[in-house]
Amino acid sequence: MSFFDTTYFCLINVKTTTLVEAWAVTHVLRHLSTRNKHAHSTLPRLQDFFVGMDDYKILKVIGEGSFGRALLVQHKNCETKWVLKEIQIPKARSGTQSRREAVLLAKMKHPNIVAFKDSFEADGYLYIAMEFCGGGDLLQRIRLQKNAHFSEDVVLKWFAQMCSGAKHIHDKRVLHRDLKSKNIFLTDNGTVKLGDFGSACLLSSAEGCAQTYVGTPYYVSPEIWDSKPYNNKSDVWSLGCVLYELCTLKHPFQACSWKSLILKVCRGAYDPLPKHLPYELHYLIKHMFKTNPRDRPSVQTILTSHRISRLLQKHLQTPEKPQTERVQRWRREDGKAVAKLLGQKTLLTASTVESTFGESHEGELRPRRRWAAGPSETVLEVLKNADVISSDSMPIGDLEACSESLASEAPQKRERRRWDREPPQRLLSLLEKASLSTAFKTYTIHRKGEGPPLGPLADRQDDAVDGPEDDLIDESRLDPRSDDEDTDFEEETHFELLDGLEKLTTEH
Ligand SMILES: Nc1ncnc2c1ncn2[C@@H]1O[C@H](COP(=O)(O)OP(=O)(O)OP(=O)(O)O)[C@@H](O)[C@H]1O
């Protein structure tokens, strides 16, 4: 199929939606057939193609990312503005591989995901036409604020919409892998949309995709620095970074060196949110920044059964349905039976402070669990002779020793799941001299021996993604899943992050 055939096909597909557009197609076809007769040896670049036509024009170059330019274009007759991403296709790569972002976007139809319009290739470039978000990206919006914080309502609304978009892609077993405020857009009417699927990766194509690390160091979760597989909770970590930025107008993990950045990320050490923000947001951030991905909530959980859910739901047009309850609710009778077994004391009395409501009955207002007024005797005993030092100044080793001694004093020593290992020494030493400015860029790092970093559309020749577009999504993966399965939603292949990173940091 020649370039012109391909272009005819694309244009017909996109523009036959209205009569006006059908007229435009006729015009374009006539124009192209004239051009075809005098076809040059060099195929036209996008500029020739659009500007030369009566119906479209390039309004401006919006910006340039790591992998190409973003252009604002307009269809003359319907005034619709699109963003056209122009991405150079690496010579060695096949065109079909290059369409991954386009195909992913096309399949992701959701009010909180940047809509796909069309994609085509010309002259070694891939063009992806997508919805133009007139409000710009969230990073620009945050910068506009200077020091004025967003209202709580705005933060919750935007975050709810981000989660809704993220849930949609996770439900399709797709990871975004590069969620950051720069890749999240606002429309003119203030709706949030996730964009830039250049890094998105279908798990079903682990063969071709999971061997590549994509991400922006400031938003990368601890497991990635630990060379663990990327999973849906890694996207949750990145969303946590964006939420934190919305709340504070700062990055959660600020640092003046790579070493300190990675240490902070791996320890999950961030400054607490401002006090005026609701408790639910504090609680959510704490959970999104759990260093063990299994302890982080999934987006499904955040939207439906987390403490924050109630606050988020009112900002969603179509509220997310609560999870189908797999775990049976704890019934009062069961509680009583277990309590009897455990020590002839009802669990209600054991776990709640006696309330002025007295004994509650089914359907009646229940007393809320409250902490006892003072710390427990055991804690007081342990702390009696302890030095008073701030946790900030306490070296991590001391903290661990202290918490271990506390645990040994406790009546029942409970094994806690932990993920607070130090980042690998080699990683720290190789990053020591690298400039931190590079930590804000999107990286693509290939496996050991794969050569230099390549764009998001570049992949191995034997990439399983290559092939008919419909093969890209395994439909069986679209079935609804339980939240437990969600936790195990991760890439199957490990990759060597350090080798790739070493190359990058010596290049920059
Ligand atoms: N759909 C869109 N609507 C409005 N602006 C957009 C859209 N897509 C991209 N932009 C803007 O175009 C510019 C370039 O975006 P692009 O996605 O090419 O790279 P980037 O996100 O800036 O960088 P990187 O590739 O490192 O992620 C950015 O300023 C971005 O805000």
Image (spheres, grey):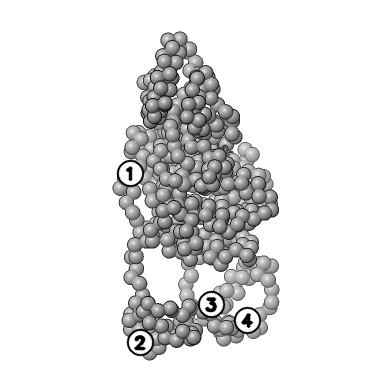
Using the image, determine if residue 370 lies above or below residue 312: below
The crowd level at tag 4 (other Cα within 10 Å; few <14, some 14-19, many 20+) is: few
Q: Position of residue 428 (x, y in %)?
A: 61, 52
- What secondary structure is found at the residue carrying circle 3? helix
Q: Position of residue 505 (x, y in %)?
A: 62, 42
The crowd level at tag 2 (other Cα within 10 Å; few <14, some 14-19, many 20+) is: few
Residue at x 36%, y 79% (from the top left corner): 362
Disc nearer the start of the sequence (2/3): 2
**Nearer to me, 419 or 62:** 62
- What secondary structure is found at the residue carrying circle 4? helix
| Gap in angstroms between the C-alphas marked 2 and 4 | 34 Å
Mark 3 sits on what residue?
Answer: 407
Disc nearer the start of the sequence (3/1): 3
**Nearer to me, 167 or 319:** 319
Using the image, determine if residue 269 lies above or below residue 88: below
The image's mark for residue 474 is 1
